[in-house]
Every structure is written in C-alpha cells, then in structure tokens.
Amino acid sequence: MLDSLDDAERREVVAAAKSLQLKTHDILAQQGAPAAHFYVIEVGRLRLSQTTESGQETAARTVGAGQSFGGTLLAGRPRYQQTARAQQPTRVLAWARPTLLALIDRYPDLKARIVEAESRPSAVPRVRFEDPGESTVTERLAHVLTRLAANGARLDDQAIDIVHSLTHQDLALLSGAELREVSMLLATWENDRIVQLSPTHVRLLDQARLEALVTAVGAPQQDSVQR
C-alpha cells in the first residue's frame, strides 16, 4: 500500500498512526458505526462479518498481517460495512479520518492504493441454503467446499488449496450447520485423507471423494460479503 512512497514518506505516514493492541475476541469496529478510522494489521488476524437486519450473521472472512480494514470511508461509505473482531492477540495501526485525509492530500497516490487494496475480490462466496430440504450437513458442507475449491490453486491431480481464509465457524455459516457438526465432519474427513486442515485454511486432498458426497443439494443462491 505504501510502495509508491519513498522511505521518508513511509515513515511520516506510519508515524501519523496510533498503534492499538487487541486481545482475542476484542471488537475493533462495529458494523453500522461511523467509519472514524482506517486500520492496517501489523500482527494477528481480524474476522470481518456482517449481520442482516433480522440479526443473522452472514459469511465472514479473515484478514491478516499487511491487510487493511476501514478504507470504505474513502469510497463514500461513512459507516463500517462489517464488524471487525480479533481472532487472536492482534496489533493494528489506526489512522483517524482527518489524519488520513490530510495524508491523502499530501500523497494522492495513497488513496488509490488504499481503494485498490480494499476492493480486491477477497470476500468468501456465500452459498445460501434458504431451505436445506432433505439434504444432510455432510452433503451441504461437501458442496460448499467443492464450490470454494473452484477458485483454488490446484497442487496436483487431486489436491487443491482453497484460497479463502476460513474458520470452522465460517464453514458452519456457509453450510447452514452447527459448529459442532462441521468440526466433527472435518475431523473425520481429515482422518480419511479427504481434507487437510489448518486453523484458517482447508486443503482438498481428494476432490473426487468429496464430490461423491454431494448427492442431494439443490442449486443454492450465492452472493458475496460486501465491504
């Protein structure tokens, strides 16, 4: 984001920020609150989520070190579009809105860099099951993973890395299931060498076996998390 600046200019921009330390589960910004700050993560991870008017949380994504949050204040959106919560001890740099606007006046390229970073298509596609019908959690979760894998980085004939950062809770939201059910299924699939898990990523080791589990899921609606 600061690539267009020289070393002295970078130091000036960073010096204008305040460093904030968050504990796990601390809320950095609340959806709907005035977008008063722009943040860049130095260490740790933030979980960004949206809540509908009915109170239902939609699919979320995770952002980590070097990524930003809150740049929508430069795109004519005066309020945060998502809630940002720390997934682990996290440190962020925070620029107050007046400070950020003053820096942009001084370094016009900075606005373009921020808007570009905030507009990258990193949101997790959401497969929405309004009515699961007769489908099982196994079928729905397998369907979600195969859909997400369509945008993954293929490693060999079978293994695929899903590029989106995903927690078990994210997958539960996407598949319309309970967290406990999803965690148990993923543990079973990992034991069966169908998937390989890390805290925030899933690797498909055997896509064919996963696709074989999808037998009763109808065509879902899909959208993406808006910033």
Image (spheres, grey):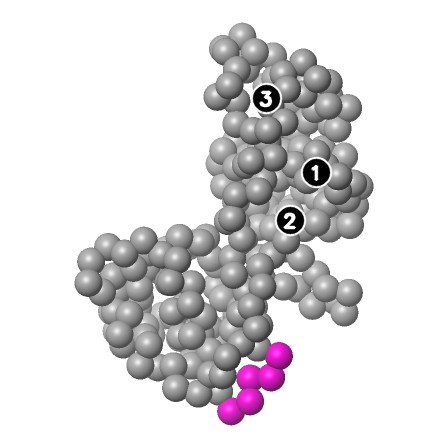
The 10 Å Cα crowd at callout 3, few under 14, some 14 to 19, many 20 or more, is some
Q: Amino acid type of disc 1?
A: Ala
Say which of 122 and 35 sits in front: 122
| Residue marked by disc 3 | 109
Residue 196, quarter of picture = bottom left
Which circle's residue, 1 or 2, is located before the other in the chain?
A: 1
Q: CA distance from mark 3 to mark 1?
A: 15 Å
Secondary structure at numbered mark 2: loop
Q: CA distance from mark 1 to mark 2?
A: 10 Å
Q: Is residue 67 above or below residue 58?
A: above
| Residue marked by disc 1 | 75
- Residue at 39% from the left image edge and 58% from the top image edge: 151
Secondary structure at numbered mark 1: loop
Residue 78: give x, y in percent of width and height.
78, 40
Q: Amino acid type of disc 3?
A: Asp
Query: Does residue 215 appear to the left or right of 172 in the view shown?
Result: left
Residue 85: give x, y in percent of width and height.
63, 48
| Residue marked by disc 2 | 227
Secondary structure at numbered mark 3: helix
The 10 Å Cα crowd at callout 1, few under 14, some 14 to 19, many 20 or more, is few
Tag 1 and tag 2, C-beta contact below 8 Å: no
Residue 69, quarter of picture = top right
Main secondary structure found in the magenta portion: loop
Residue 155: give x, y in percent of width and height.
24, 55
The 10 Å Cα crowd at callout 2, few under 14, some 14 to 19, many 20 or more, is some
Which circle's residue, 3 or 2, is located before the other in the chain?
A: 3
Span of residues in magenta: 130-134
Q: Amino acid type of disc 2?
A: Arg
Q: Nearer the viewer, mark 3 or mark 2?
A: 3
